[in-house]
């Protein structure tokens, strides 16, 4: 799984904590987390861009219901791409999005082999 996150944050440490809070629902299934990018977002002051590769243990009862629970823990509204779905996007600006995890401005998740 690959995540691109725009975090509302004053510094790198807080941005990394926001990523950890996003991953909390699936923490026990994470084998490895590699943060590939963590820097101020060039478009908007007070935002940090994070890109991370997450390797998951699919043998630990990781199901479609678990994925949906994970997504619901982040946002109540997702835009989905692909058939089958292999990319999801949630943003403060998405029409109908009322709930987004604290500190998240935008999150894009790409699923591989799910």
Image (cartoon, grey):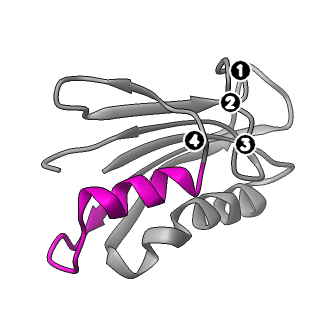
Q: Can residue 54 be seen from the camera position used here? A: no
Residue annotated with mark 2: 97
Residue 1, image x, y percentages: 30, 51
Helix, strand or loop for disc 3: loop
**For the residues marked 3 and 4, what is the alpha-carbon distance in whole angstroms?**
16 Å
Question: Which image quadrant is residue 34 in?
Answer: bottom left
Report the Cα–Cα distance between label 2 and label 1.
7 Å
Whether 65 is among the magenta residues is yes
Which circle, 2 or 4, is nearer the viewer? 2
Q: Residues within 10 Å of mark 1 (few under 14, many from 20)?
A: few
Mark 1 highlights which residue? 93
Q: CA distance from mark 2 to mark 4?
A: 16 Å
Image: magenta residue range = 53-74
Residue identifier under label 4: 5
Q: Nearer the viewer, residue 48 or 111?
A: 111
Secondary structure of the residue carrying numbered label 1: loop
Q: CA distance from mark 1 to mark 4?
A: 14 Å
* Residue 79 drawn at (x, y percent): 46, 25
Q: Is residue 79 left or right of residue 16?
A: left
**Element under label 4?**
strand
Residue placed under numbered mark 3 in the picture: 99
Q: Sequence order check: which comes first, mark 1 or mark 4?
A: 4
**What residue do we see at 26% from left, 56% from top?**
64
The answer to whether the residues at label 2 and label 1 have Cβ atoms under 8 Å apart is: yes
Mark before the other along the chain sequence, 1 or 3: 1
Asked whether, in this view, residue 59 is left or right of residue 77, the answer is left
């Amino acid at each position: 799984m690959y995540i691109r996150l725009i975090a509302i944050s004053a510094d790198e440490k807080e941005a990394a904590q926001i990523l950890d809070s996003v991953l909390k629902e699936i923490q026990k299934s994470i084998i490895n987390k590699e943060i590939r990018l963590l820097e101020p977002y060039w478009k908007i002051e007070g935002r940090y861009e994070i890109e991370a590769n997450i390797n998951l243990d699919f043998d630990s009862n990781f199901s479609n219901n678990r994925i949906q629970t994970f997504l619901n823990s982040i946002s109540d509204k997702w835009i989905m791409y692909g058939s089958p779905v292999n990319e999801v996007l949630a943003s403060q600006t998405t029409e109908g999005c009322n709930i987004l995890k604290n500190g998240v401005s935008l999150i894009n998740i790409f699923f591989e082999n799910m």
